[in-house]
């Protein structure tokens, strides 16, 4: 099997893993919504309010587009090294922030534990490996992390607006209704700095990978 077919098989397997992980969590979230007397629509709105779900979904969508339409404008854009690296930075941020900030805040069991491990550990680890295999294509720029940070910053703005309107926030460290806006913004700035540092680390690793792979 040549390198191109290996990369395609890797991407296909990763897309399937991300897709199945999101579907499993969606099913569990809908079951919980119904159990709590909420509508499917309300359950879906809550489901898609999580950064973890959105980022894992972006992996599935981007890989699928690059696989089924590699010559299309969307497929080409999703396969760009800067885009792949940006997704890697965001999904790595998902795994690290969950591990250090959230994993001790609940005790998932059964199918929920499986979904938890897939979304926060398996998919992030495998996608970073996928990015590493792709990183030899083009050297990343040191300004890339600033572009990548637009997504988490936009997510924060969306979460704060949605939280204000519905009275519910997806994560305790941005729960402005409970900890106040000053503490929320302080937490957000701190997390954004961590994200940019993580992005710079990926740029450095990517540039090393590019030199090695040439």
Image (cartoon, grey):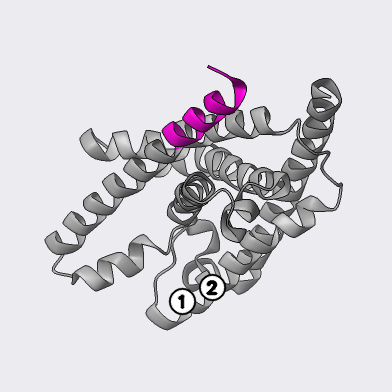
The 10 Å Cα crowd at callout 1, few under 14, some 14 to 19, many 20 or more, is some
Q: Main secondary structure of the magenta part?
A: helix
Residue 107 in view of the camera = no
**Per the image, is 3 magenta?**
yes
Comparing 211 with 186, the one in front is 211
Q: What residue is shown with label 2?
A: 158
User: Is residue 76 placed above or below 100 in the rendered structure?
Assistant: below
Residue 16 image offset from top left, x and y in percent = 38, 38
Report the span colored magenta. Answer: 1-14
Q: Are marks 1 and 2 in contact (CB under 8 Å)?
A: yes
Query: Which mark is on residue 162?
Result: 1
Quadrant in the picture for residue 184: bottom right
Task: Residue at 42%, 64% (x, y): give it.
Answer: 49
Task: Residue at 17%, 55% (x, y): give it.
Answer: 31
Residue 18 image offset from top left, x and y in percent = 41, 41
Residue 59 in view of the camera = yes
Q: Residue furthest top?
A: 1
Secondary structure of the residue carrying tag 2 is: helix
């Amino acid at each position: 099997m040549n390198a191109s077919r290996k990369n395609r098989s890797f991407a296909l397997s990763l897309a399937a893993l991300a897709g199945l992980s999101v579907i499993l969590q969606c099913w569990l979230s809908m079951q919980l919504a119904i159990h709590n007397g909420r509508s499917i629509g309300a359950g879906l709105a809550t489901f898609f309010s999580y950064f973890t779900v959105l980022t894992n979904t972006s992996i599935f969508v981007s890989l699928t587009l690059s696989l089924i339409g590699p010559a299309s404008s969307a497929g080409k854009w999703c396969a760009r090294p800067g885009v792949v690296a940006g997704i890697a930075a965001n999904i790595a941020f998902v795994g690290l922030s969950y591990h250090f900030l959230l994993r001790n805040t609940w005790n998932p069991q059964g199918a929920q534990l499986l979904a938890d491990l897939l979304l926060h550990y398996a998919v992030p680890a495998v996608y970073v490996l996928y990015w590493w295999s792709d990183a030899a294509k083009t050297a990343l720029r040191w300004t890339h992390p600033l572009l990548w940070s637009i997504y988490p910053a936009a997510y924060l703005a969306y979460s704060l607006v949605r939280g204000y309107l519905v009275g519910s926030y997806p994560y305790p460290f941005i729960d402005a209704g409970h900890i106040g806006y000053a503490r929320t913004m302080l937490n957000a700035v701190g997390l954004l700095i961590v994200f940019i540092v993580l992005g710079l680390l990926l740029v450095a690793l990517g540039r090393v990978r590019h030199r090695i792979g040439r």
